[in-house]
Amino acid sequence: MKPETWSYDGSLESLLVLVAHGLSEGMAPASVLCAIRPEMGLFGNEASWSAYCPPKAAVDVAVDAILEVSRRYYAAVLRAWMSEEALEADLVAVGLDCLRRGETALGDYSFPSLSRLAAAVRQVTKETHLLEGFARFSLRRDGRYVALLEPQFNVLPALAPFFLGRFGAEAFAIVDLVRGFGLASVKKGSLISLESLNGEGLKGVMPEAEEEEEVALWRSYFKTVENVDRRNPDLQRRLMPLRYWGQLTELGSSRQ
Amino acid sequence: MELGKKLEILSAGARYDVSCASSGSDRRAPPGGMGRNLPAGVCHSFAGDGRCISLLKLLFSNACRYDCAYCMNRASNDIPRASFSTQELTKLTLSFYRRNYIEGLFLSSGVFADPDIVMERLVEVARSLREDAGFGGYIHLKAIPGCGDRLLKKAGRYADRLSANIELPTAASLSKLAPDKSGKEILSSMRFIGESCAEAREDSRRIAATPDFAPAGQSTQLIVGATPDDDMALLGLAQSLYRRYRLRRVYYSAYLPVGLDARLPTGPPPLLREHRLYQADWLLRFYGFKAEELLNPALPNLCEEIDPKSAWALAHPEFFPVELSRASMEELMRVPGLGATSARRIVSARRAAKLKPELLPRLGLVMKRARYFLSLYGRALETSIAWEGLRPLLMDRPPASRTPLLGKAAWSGPSGKPMALAVQSQLEFVFP
Ligand code: SF4
């Protein structure tokens, strides 16, 4: 049998359909072309199967099929997508293994696909957890709190539930400056993309001016709580990697 | 006094309390409110000394009638004094919380009046945050030494965690350095808090509407190195507090000189000792060790050169090697260099497939120390070093400072379509 190449548009919806396709066919593709990865333009002519802008009904069916494998597997698919790594074929291979052996397959690190997938999932989980702490919000005149982030992975969707819980009924937005998109709360418990919010996209939620009083108080607090007799900048950098410092108000970022 | 100055004075006064956790409680704000606690806790920043900043840690007031020798806020110390108002504290907490600087408030105070009056003020701040502002974030309140149970009961309704600091491990040390405090009273507060937590948990199993009582439990703090008490006294006390009053956490704080007092040591803070105590405490809480396994009258202090688990392993050659293919979680966790996560990964991997030596690095295990203590199908993983030669290999460099031991959306893809909100709830823990 000729090795299969599949292609998709890079969206989560299409990835779900791709994974469900692999599960129903009982086979993983030899390679997958993704429209937003550099190896390919938008059209993968050489692909024997593709998923582009799938209809909602197809996505719903795919979600059900993946959840039927296991909830943990579904969670792994979501995080694999956020990692932006080329893990599509691995995802299908691990899903098929799960269908054969149940969830035990998710502990089989001797299977290279699982081992790669687990490493990516761990990285995304770690980044999400760090940003739950390191995101900094500032208040706009329209009453919305906004955080500008530069995440290494596409983690806004994973961060959203944390901040929804935190802000409750108050309006907020989280913005991914690297990927140029954001999520804004519209009412308690739901988020929409910035484009749908105000038609202005990122421009409509950018912070207006530095909040001098709050920033000064926080910086003063940060400085005072340090025990200078125990200064340990190496430990500080290990626990709070330098790549986040640009967004941290207490370390001098004036972005907020 | 302007707010910035108060913040400076009252945060400096609180920084000697090392408790920093915002974990252990799962709380949502009431409808219309804001704030959410997750059981795992979150670090929002790390200070220059490497300590996690999770809570806005403040004193209500640094005025104090007591004269504890080890404390900068003691009555006899000539320092500027300040106090917050309830309104200032609630406003500051909410403002920092909304900007995601903190998970919540840790509020303590000097004993500026009768302990009940001071405790009442702390409770009022917590009440105002919960009831007036609908705040669902984390609140840790200090139990003022000598305050009555009635106020502790009220405090537990609003706080996620309460703490009564025992500070020193023996009655003799306490009467020498903190003559105004009574060990009995502190232990009695701990007992009351422990019993009230247990009662609330028990009642909530039967009656869903049972009001919370400090759902994240209680903690305490012990000062290390201000008195000649040895590690056995400190760790033994910690173990009995964990058992008797179900404390969630004992914090150890290396004594920092805060002035000249003939009763106190003048040397640098015993940071390495503090670090070793945290490691040993971790073994008590999560690894099934007992204090008497780690220390005894012939060996009353933890070894400085080697971590407590490695020291225990070297003293127990009969326990090793631990067989990877069939050892229990408990046995695996006694291996130097293997933690709970590594043990879980080993158990889960061998359920799925036969363990092979080449698979071990893929499990993400750090084998630097562990390999001397493990075997696979009867063959030791490392045979080049005799048992007697292991000690130098297990020594770690003293840390330069405190090491905290550790902690439904729609979006558009390129297709431009919003993704179903329901997927967000699936984003839980995936791989150990
Ligand atoms: S009671 Fe003792 S430890 Fe507490 S603030 Fe007063 S002097 Fe300091």
Image: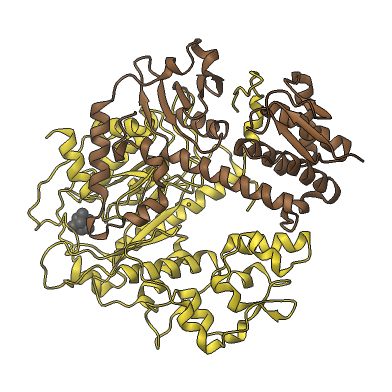
Chain colours: A brown, B yellow
Up-down: is A33 above or below B8? above
- Image quadrant holding the C terminus of chain A, namely top left
Judged left or right of residue B12, residue B284 is: right
User: Which residue lies at the image location 32% right of the left edge and 41% below the top edge?
Assistant: B123
Residue in front for this viewpoint, A82 or A186: A82
Ligand 1, what quadrant? Answer: bottom left
- From this viewpoint, which residue is outermost toward the left? B78
Q: Position of residue B225 (x, y in %)?
A: 26, 71
Please state the total of marks drawn on the protein image: 0
Please indicate, yes or no, whether residue B101 appears anywhere in the rendered image.
no
Q: Position of residue B313 (x, y in %)?
A: 53, 80
Up-down: is B268 above or below A140? below
Up-down: is B221 above or below B428? below
- Image quadrant holding the N terminus of chain A, namely top right
Judged left or right of residue A159, residue A223 is: left
Q: Position of residue A242 (x, y in %)?
A: 39, 45
User: Which residue lies at the image location 66% right of the left edge and 65% below the top edge?
Assistant: B360
Please indicate, yes or no, whether residue B216 appears anywhere in the rendered image.
yes
Up-down: is B369 above or below A110? below
Quarter of the figure with residue A247? top left
Residue in front for this viewpoint, B301 or A229: A229
User: Which residue lies at the image location 36% right of the left edge and 59% below the top edge?
Assistant: B220
- From this viewpoint, which residue is outermost toward the right? A1
Q: Position of residue A49 (x, y in %)?
A: 82, 28
User: Which residue lies at the image location 17% right of the left edge and 48% below the top edge?
Assistant: B62
Residue in front for this viewpoint, A46 or B282: A46
Judged left or right of residue B212, residue B183 is: left
